[in-house]
């Protein structure tokens, strides 16, 4: 009797992750709205580039300091309530920013937003690590990242256009978008789906000390700092100011540059996640850091809109190649059978640290030197992050 070969079905992305992907898209649309106008809004209170950059850094700083507490809240109450609460905190603080009457009020409200941001970010990442099937971790990371990037493409363009109607308008629209995202999660994800069942054995904690023994984890922390410095910090804080000061003094120019970066990022996501499941994580992490770092280094020396669009697209492509592979590598290290909250939070904190330090240093370099110097140093940080990965182990189980 002939035995027919067994057809192995590819694992599907769990429903809960698809819901988070949908919410991520809405969040990204809203965040993209304020990105091109936030530095200009801060400078409207008669402050310099450094003070304007601190607004971006303050958001990341409070993400950083609240990350350990956020992890403990998740362990106590579960991911779903912390995720929803975090979104609502950011919604309230963003809405309040629209009515700020001074620079210090903007700083306060954006700082409070950082607390809510780390709550829903760590909740989402912890759930993805736990629910994503090991053989499609790169694919899941790409899908989740693509939602942010697709929203990030349209958001900055719309934000730049809304900025022409008034710098406060995008903040109000973003607040509404966050409430919509919270409603999506509340309506479509059950409480029990986001926390272990009562009779499920307690998973052993994967500590930061244990993780640091892994060369790939140490390299991930370095590249997280570089990525946060360049792509979450300096790009959001300095690029809009550079675009309006050097290229053209119109809000839509900054929005266009950020949108093209997001578009390049989306292109990288289309292939890097799936291929990293088959080829490995390291080639895409190293390649992404090199491309993004080099493109960032020359950004401050361009003088025309077409060149700014070109280097922004290339830098976005590099970041798109990097991010899914790096997130999948972290999941490989932590594994779904361990409680990886502390280790995941530490990597998130590394990225936030870069987001804090990068804009402040870049702002000082602009005030005391030039935009070219600020972007050159930022790109160099990305290139230096390649070095630990050259000796790090490959985390994916590939032949």
Image (cartoon, helix red, strand yellow):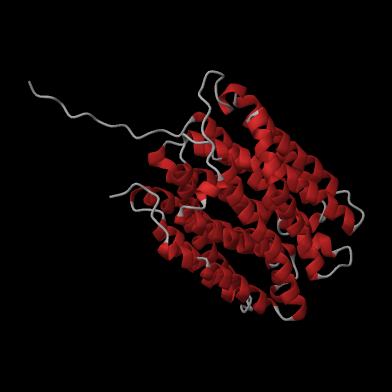
- Residue located at (34% from left, 53% from top): 279
Q: Nearer the viewer, residue 267 or 89?
A: 89
Q: Is residue 211 left or right of residue 7?
A: right
What residue is rendered at 47% in x and 62% in y?
288
Please identify the quarter of the rendering in which residue 367 is found.
bottom right
Q: How many marks?
A: 0
Q: Position of residue 250 (x, y in %)?
A: 74, 66
Q: Is residue 365 above or below residue 20?
A: below
Q: Residue furthest top?
A: 199
Residue lying at the far bottom in this picture: please name it. 369
Residue 24 rendering spot, x and y as whole percentages:
60, 42
Residue at position x 63%, y 76% in the image: 304
**At 83% across and 70% down in the image, what residue appears?**
48
| Viewer-proximal residue among 129 and 235 | 129
Quadrant that contains the N terminus: top left
Q: Position of residue 300 (x, y in %)?
A: 64, 76
Q: Looking at the picture, does residue 181 appear above or below residue 221?
A: above
Q: Nearer the viewer, residue 219 or 368?
A: 219
Q: Residue furthest right?
A: 101
**In this view of the protein, can residue 92 be seen by the observer?**
yes
| Rendered image quadrant of residue 81 | top right
Percent across and percent down for residue 284 are 42, 58
Up/down of 264 relative to 74, above or below:
below
In the displayed structure, 69 sits above or below 238; it is above
Can residue 260 be seen here? no
């Amino acid at each position: 009797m002939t035995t027919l070969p067994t057809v192995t079905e590819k694992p599907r992305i769990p429903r809960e992750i698809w819901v988070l992907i949908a919410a991520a898209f809405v969040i990204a649309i809203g965040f993209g709205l304020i990105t091109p106008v936030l530095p200009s809004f801060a400078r409207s209170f008669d402050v310099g580039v450094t003070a304007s950059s601190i607004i971006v850094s303050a958001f990341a700083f409070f993400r950083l300091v609240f990350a350990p507490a956020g992890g403990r809240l998740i362990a106590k109450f579960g991911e779903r309530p912390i995720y929803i609460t975090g979104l609502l905190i950011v919604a309230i603080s963003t809405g309040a920013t629209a009515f700020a009457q001074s620079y210090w009020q903007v700083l306060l409200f954006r700082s409070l937003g950082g607390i809510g941001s780390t709550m829903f970010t760590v909740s989402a990442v912890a759930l993805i690590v736990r629910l994503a099937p090991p053989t499609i971790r790169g694919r899941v990371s790409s899908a989740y990242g693509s939602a942010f990037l697709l929203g990030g493409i349209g958001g900055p363009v719309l934000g730049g256009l809304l900025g022409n109607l008034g710098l406060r308008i995008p903040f109000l629209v973003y607040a509404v978008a966050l409430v919509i995202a919270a409603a999506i999660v509340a309506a479509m994800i059950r409480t029990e789906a986001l926390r272990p069942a009562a009779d499920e054995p307690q998973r052993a904690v994967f500590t930061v000390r244990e993780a640091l023994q892994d060369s790939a984890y140490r390299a991930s922390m370095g590249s997280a700092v570089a990525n946060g410095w360049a792509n979450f910090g300096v790009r959001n804080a300095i690029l809009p100011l550079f675009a309006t000061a050097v290229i053209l003094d119109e809000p839509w120019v900054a929005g266009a540059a950020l949108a093209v970066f997001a578009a390049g990022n989306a292109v990288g996501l289309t292939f890097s996640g799936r291929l990293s499941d088959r080829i490995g994580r390291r080639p895409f992490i190293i390649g992404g850091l090199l491309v993004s770092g080099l493109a960032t280094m020359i950004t401050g020396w361009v003088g025309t809109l077409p060149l700014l669009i070109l280097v922004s697209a290339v830098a976005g492509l590099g970041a798109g190649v990097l991010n899914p592979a790096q997130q999948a590598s972290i999941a490989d290290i932590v594994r779904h059978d361990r409680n990886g909250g502390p280790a995941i939070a530490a990597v998130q904190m590394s990225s936030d640290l870069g987001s804090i330090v990068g804009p402040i240093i870049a702002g000082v370099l602009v005030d005391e030197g030039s935009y070219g110097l600020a972007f050159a140093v930022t790109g160099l940080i990305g290139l230096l992050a390649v070095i630990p990965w050259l000796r790090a182990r490959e985390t994916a189980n590939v032949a």
